[in-house]
């Protein structure tokens, strides 16, 4: 029976354990936190967890689709709260396309329970992996009393997240390319209780966004009618930042100026603002993801991305599905499956990393920009006219399983069509008029028959 | 008396110590190696140490110009050994411009002796810095017996090289952007003894290059008539590499095929090839270089670059000169001097890092490319016609002190002139003809009066 050792019982480690267990592997998962509940309940870790088709597909492979559905709230678009209390709804698609807002804690608990029920899979809590010895094929684990254990491994998979201990050690070896890149903003978790959301009639099946340039609040719905929010604010001392606001009255003064309509939703604002930590956003890129046929990185350990596109967990789940397939393809050659896995994933993950950085600025600045909104309208119309052919970039990423790189590589082609359309006054005046529709149809057809190969 | 603690008694740490000592600071330098000789004699560390105007200028500021001159060998250009034993001389400039080939060991010893003679500067060997405590302003040092000491610091400067311990700890903090990027080639040190160099009449005042695409030998002259060589070869198992050659006869077979004219110069080839380590090349980029007014990175610790442009030590020396000026500019505000230092240096070091990566490929492939050589001839002619105005990119980097970024930013402008010139058949036929000279003069004048602002 082939043995796999996984470090980390987060979302990716657990799903990979389940998928490999179901394929007949013997899987040992080690998690540093002693109590499973601590793993799930880290402050601020709930930020931005939305599942999309990619993640859901991978969960299907583990037979968890029905169970996970019970935990999520579908969201059908963005509800923008502009300054002056004006509200604008931006649906994600023309056909009820949805993301699925879910509590990280509940999803993690579901996966743990499923892993523990999977034959051949065991999860051990309270042992922190602090390193490996490649020549002896052992890992070092310490418990809460700093007692150290050496255990042998055959295949070691680091699913230990953005601050991976396995990757830290790989980084010290020759030939390991690595980068970490922080955003100039940090996140702080705030909450909108059910009663406030109801009193203010906050639509439940939407992600609510208060964009204020350098500051932004994003609210994700929970099943109980409450919302979990992220306040994004500039990091560092050189910016005008809430960081420099030390007193409650100073903080409230600025908050009221920026978010007068959000403040009424958050009765615990002061307490949460001063108590909750500032969570940085970090992109991690590295290569190679493996050492020989022995060690592989997966999920955030291999490729941390900013949460702005909501793809972190989805990308990790997709990793699990694809690695599992690669291991099926090369059942007796672990190195070949690692190489195949990196070949399939690396360029795609680099792409979504870039996209998440860019999208972060897009959300903050562009959601209220007239030119950007006009382009979105044309895209929406193109999708209505060519529903099985054309999807916007956001849709390709969030609502299909087209590899990330391919999804992005198509964009310049569509940009040319839209640039062409924007030469028409009619389109600028009203992209939804009959005349505009005809023009969009003709232009798209002309371009797509010439060039497009989907 | 203001106190400065420097980690690392390498080239940068020592020169900075001297410059600050001369400005009245009290400087403590800690070096991990116990015996100074060990610091200087690391295998393979001698690769590519050539001083240019930037480095020499900084050494002048320390009053070391006369002493250092006694140690170096001027090199006036490249001597290419092409396949088929054909030899081509490429002078660096039209006016005897030279780089200065110098032994890292001797240069380091000179700096150590100068530092020890500088009032207020002390150098302690055999204490390795393993980290700092920011809140307590202390560093942890261990000696060879693993005995640990905590010492207070006021201002801590990490001059501890590409594998900096100070930077490693900074990397774990929030907001520290970092990347390490390895070349796909490694270096191995080989030697040409004086008698072989003499017997084969190897010109002493040139850098000798045997370019063979994926493989290359570069030989630097020493004062005793010997040469220290770098063999560049592909790293990793996927390439046709000497790495896979395990027996002497296999190695010699391939070496004879690639370098039949170099093999006679190296009587210790087999021994050196199998004993000397493979030295990787790594670019390090990070930011910010400082924490508050307390800690600063300098030299390779802040910005490791590939040795291909020969700028590593020069950039480190330039750092010392510029930091020393920044500290003079803000005598009572260390943070302001750190910020000013990073503002002045970061973009320039990013530029030379990119350039060193690109130049690595240029040397290997382009030095024998006819188009590349034709462009070089036009550049040479432009410099002859406009000697105080026009310098090639290589000359701007190696023979001026124009900031690296500015040196590179000028290139597209000159490229346009050369592109324009290459439309002429006469130029292609003979860039040195009278007619070509007139054309070059006219074209350069036309462009430069319109656009150029040096």
Image: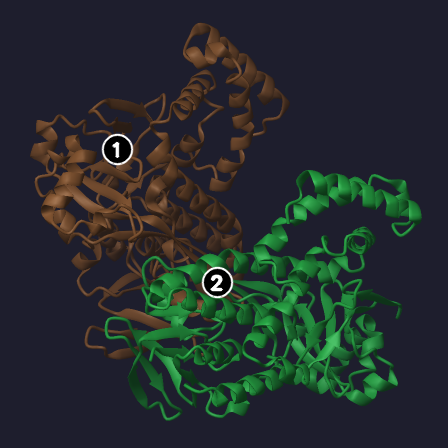
Chain colours: A green, B brown
Which disc number belongs to residue B290?
2
Q: Which mark is residue B209?
A: 1
Q: Nearer the viewer, residue A334 or B319?
A: A334
Q: Is residue B310 visible?
A: no
x and y, in percent, of residue A393 in the image: 69, 56
Instruction: From the viewer's perspective, tell me whether residue A355 is left or right of residue B343.
Output: right
Q: Quarter-wise, where is residue A412 in the image?
A: top right
Instruction: Please name the residue shown 31% across and 61% down the image.
Output: B8
What percent of the width, then of the height, locates residue B87? 23, 23
Query: Which mark identifies residue B432?
Result: none
Q: What residue is rendered at 86% in x and 40% in y? A: A424
Above or below residue B404? Residue A178 is below
In the image, B181: left or right of B338? Answer: left
Identify the mark nearer the N-term, 2 or 1. 1
Pick the residue in front: A95 or B239. Answer: A95
Q: Nearer the viewer, mark 2 or mark 1?
A: 1
**Which chain does the residue under circle 1 lie in?**
B
């Amino acid at each position: 029976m082939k043995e796999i050792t996984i470090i980390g019982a987060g979302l990716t480690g657990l799903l990979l354990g389940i998928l490999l267990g179901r394929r007949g592997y013997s899987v040992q998962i080690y998690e540093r936190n002693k109590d499973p509940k601590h793993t799930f309940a880290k402050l601020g870790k709930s930020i931005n967890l939305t599942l999309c088709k990619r993640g859901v597909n991978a969960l299907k492979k583990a037979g968890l689709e029905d169970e996970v559905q019970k935990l999520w709230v579908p969201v059908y678009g963005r509800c923008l709260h502009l300054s002056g209390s004006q509200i604008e709804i931006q649906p994600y698609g023309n056909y009820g396309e949805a993301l699925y807002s879910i509590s990280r804690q509940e999803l993690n608990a579901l996966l743990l329970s499923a892993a523990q029920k999977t034959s051949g899979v065991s999860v051990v809590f309270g042992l922190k992996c602090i390193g490996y010895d490649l020549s002896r094929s052992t890992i070092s684990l310490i418990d809460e009393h700093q007692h150290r254990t050496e255990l042998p491994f055959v295949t070691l998979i680091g699913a230990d997240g953005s601050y991976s201990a396995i990757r830290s050690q790989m980084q010290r070896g020759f030939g390991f390319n690595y980068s970490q890149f922080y955003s100039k903003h940090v996140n702080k978790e705030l909450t909108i209780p059910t009663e406030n959301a109801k009193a203010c009639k906050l639509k439940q099946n939407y992600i609510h966004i208060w964009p204020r340039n350098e500051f932004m609040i994003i609210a994700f719905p929970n099943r109980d009618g409450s919302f979990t929010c992220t306040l994004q604010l500039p990091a560092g001392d050189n910016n005008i930042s809430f960081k420099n606001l030390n007193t409650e009255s100073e903080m409230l003064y600025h908050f009221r100026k920026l978010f007068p309509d959000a403040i009424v939703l958050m009765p615990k604002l002061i307490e949460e603002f001063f108590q909750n930590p500032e969570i940085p956003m970090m992109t991690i890129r590295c290569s190679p993801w493996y050492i020989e046929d022995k060690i592989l990185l997966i999920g955030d350990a291999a490729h941390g991305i900013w949460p702005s596109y909501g793809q972190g967990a989805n990308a990790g789940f997709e990793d699990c599905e694809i690695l599992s397939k690669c291991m099926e393809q090369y059942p007796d050659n672990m190195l070949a499956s690692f190489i195949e896995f990196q070949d399939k994933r690396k360029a795609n993950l680099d792409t979504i990393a870039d996209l998440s950085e860019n999208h972060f600025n897009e959300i903050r600045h562009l959601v209220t920009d007239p030119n950007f909104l006009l382009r979105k309208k044309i895209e929406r119309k193109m999708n209505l006219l060519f529903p099985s052919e054309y999807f916007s970039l956001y849709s390709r990423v969030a609502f299909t399983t087209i590899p990330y790189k391919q999804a992005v590589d198509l964009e310049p082609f569509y940009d040319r069509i839209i640039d062409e359309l924007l030469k028409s006054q009619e389109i600028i005046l009203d992209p939804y008029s009959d005349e505009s529709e005809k023009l969009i149809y003709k232009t798209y057809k002309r371009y797509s028959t010439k060039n497009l190969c989907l």
